[in-house]
Image (cartoon, rainbow, N blue to C red):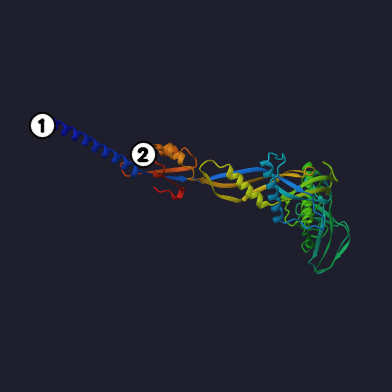
Amino acid sequence: MRKMSYRMKVYKIVAALFLCAVILSSVFIIHFALSRATIILSSRETPLFVKKDFTVQIQSQKSEAEPAPSLEDLSQEIKAVELSLAKDKAQGTESIAQYDFVGELIEVQISGEKKFKPTAIGKSVEGFAQGIVTIINDSNYDQTLVKTTRLLTPENVLFRIQQTVVVRKKGSVTMLAVADKKGASGDVGGTVFRIPGLSQSAQKLIYAKIDKPFVGGLSSSSVVTKPDITNAEIALVEEIENKGLVEMHAQNSNITLKDVVPEIISLSSSAKEGDGVDEFSVSGQLLLRAVHFDKKALLDLLKQRLRDELKPNEMVLYYDEPSFDYEITSLNKDENKAVVTASLKAFGALTTENMDKVKTLLAGSDASAVQSYFLKNPNISAVSVRFWPFWVKSVPRLFDHVNIIIVGEDEMVK
């Protein structure tokens, strides 16, 4: 009996232990099966920028009988070159001189000449001021005024008329008057002259006035400065470039000034620095070379280069295409090669792709640790962490139980 009782106790203990193990296993399984974590990241729009050099294989200029190639033709040529390069690379015979685009070279030679005025003022020179006066006769009789008759301003500046005239009653006459002395005092304007040679009563009825200021009392000569010559040369070069662009459009209407590389053959000025002249001319001759290539293909390739440089878990939200810019930085006709430097702005944000590594790293972390980890990234402005059920206090170790959501700053759920 005692043996039977002992065995029953052992069986009960084993059964109890088994039951506890089953319960603990069930709790453990339920915990992992139900535990969930949702991590919401508020992503900032990050400015992106790319600037790269591209090589253009330039072809000889077409004859007048041959039409300019279309963008579609150039695109086909680009694809052919790319396929050829890919084949060479696969065979280990990749050429040193690789090209990103195929373009056409157009050349014109243009000359021009333009006149300019100096901006600097030289020494002042005194002279006899002069101008046209109108002598008015409001009296009832004709008045004769002899040559050198005096005209006097309210400031007592003296002028003399240059010919003898008869001013009819109730009439007027215009003539030249010259200052009696040299100097700036003679440069008067908008004034009334009295005629001191007449009686006091006659002076009230017979007088002179001017409509335009007198000049010549003090004048300055213009002097050519170095900036005058430099600015004139720049202006002439721009004018010749625009003139050449019009001529190029006869061969290819898609050419713009950004496609043109100017080479100055000659540039000269009729005046040198320090010359006192009222006007000078600048003449020059330019050789203009334009490279025509597919701008859309360049933009697409630049976008690809930008995507290639993205950081892990970063994506392009949108491209700022109006910021797209390019410049032909070098042109070597002997090597049939040109280098184009292009740039583009864009805006990026985080992406949830390839987050498994991050989930592994965060497994077992509490909400505070998760927030600290993500806020180290300057592209993240806020982090919200939610665990479920209520007893879960850390990130589950199962990938599919962790959901990472990225929203914009204005979409962040509190």
Q: Is residue 410 visible?
A: yes
Mark 1 and mark 2: span between their CA atoms?
A: 54 Å
Q: Is residue 38 visible?
A: no
In the foreground, 177 or 24: 24
In the foreground, 263 or 368: 368
Instruction: Check whether the beta carbons of the residues at disc 1 and disc 2 lie within 8 A of each other.
Output: no
Instruction: State the image coordinates of residue 362 (x, y, percent, origin top left).
Output: 42, 37
In which quadrant of the rendered view does residue 391 lie? top left
In the foreground, 328 or 350: 350
Count residues near mark 2 (Cα–Cα under 10 Å), then give few for <14, some for 14-19, many for 20+.
Answer: many
Between marks 1 and 2 in the image, the one whose residue lies nearer the viewer: 1
Q: Residue furthest left?
A: 1
Instruction: State the image coordinates of residue 162 (x, y, percent, origin top left).
Output: 87, 57
Instruction: State the image coordinates of residue 346 (x, y, percent, origin top left).
Output: 57, 47
In the foreground, 122 or 76: 76
Element carrying mark 1: loop
Q: Which residue is mark 1?
A: 1
Count residues near mark 1 (Cα–Cα under 10 Å), then give few for <14, some for 14-19, many for 20+.
Answer: few
- The kind of residue on which mark 2 rests is Ser
Q: Which residue is mark 2?
A: 394
Reading the chain from its start, which is encountered first: label 1 or label 2?
1
Element carrying mark 2: loop
Residue ID at (10%, 31%): 1
